[in-house]
Image (spheres, grey):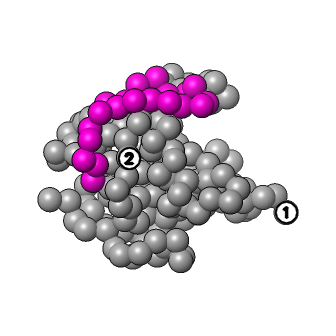
Amino acid sequence: MPEIQRYAGVLARHANRIALIRERYEEWNLPPYWSPPSGAVEPGETPPTGARRELQEESGLHAPTLHLAWTTRVEVDGTLTSRSWNYVTDVDDPTFAINDPDNSVLEARWFTYADAIEALKNMPYPPIAVPAIHYLTNGTQLNWHFTQTNNTWTWTLTAPARADAYDGPAVPPRS
């Protein structure tokens, strides 16, 4: 059975804006796209620890606290391939300082909620884009289950998102 990959991401907020990064992965052979800072949870890390590290590496922002916003499970052709935990945080210092060891991040920028939603619509990976857009639109914590069969994505969802022992209180609604 293949190893299930673990990922974590963060929607960072400041002054009613959302931080997104523009990145490019050569293996996807696609133009750069906007995404929340996110990436693989490394061995020995919990999802919150991985989320904080990814936020710092990809944007230079620091998460004083993390609140679970959504989780995902991804199946490809009937095999569970990944799980992710995605958080929201309010940052005190909005200064970007990219230090991405993968060199995939091209820039970081603050967006209004409406502009962030529009930018995320162009993201080529539904298991990140769809929940992020839904959360920015509704502020609802959900568990998402994505299935890809023959290169077609479908998804189902349940509420509320659970941290599975990796997080504490529910996320506060945006102000």
Q: Amino acid at mark 1?
A: Met
129, 21: nearer the viewer: 21
Residue drawn at (41%, 25%) of the image: 107
Q: Position of residue 139 (x, y in %)?
A: 27, 62
Q: As drawn, is 10 to the left or to the right of 38?
A: left
> How many labels, in total?
2
Q: Position of residue 110 (x, y in %)?
A: 27, 35
6, 144: nearer the viewer: 6
What is the C-alpha distance between the residues marked 2 and 1?
36 Å
Which residue is tagged 1? 1
Residue drawn at (54%, 31%) of the image: 100
137, 71: nearer the viewer: 71
Say which of marks 2 and 1 sits in front. 2
Q: Secondary structure at mark 1?
A: loop
Determine whether 125 is above or below 78 in the image: above
Residue 161 appears in which quarter of the rendering?
A: bottom left
Q: Secondary structure at mark 2?
A: loop
Quarter that holds the C terminus? bottom left
Confirm whether the magenta stretch covers residue 106.
yes
Which residue is tagged 2? 62
Please provide the residue range marked out in magenta. 90-109
Q: Amino acid at mark 2?
A: His
Query: In terms of sequence position, does the residue under pointer 2 or pointer 1 come before the other?
Result: 1
134, 87: nearer the viewer: 87
Q: How packed is label 1: few (under 14 Cα within 10 Å), some, or many (20 or more)?
A: few
Let me know if residue 34 appears in the view.
Answer: no
Residue 160 appears in which quarter of the rendering?
A: bottom left
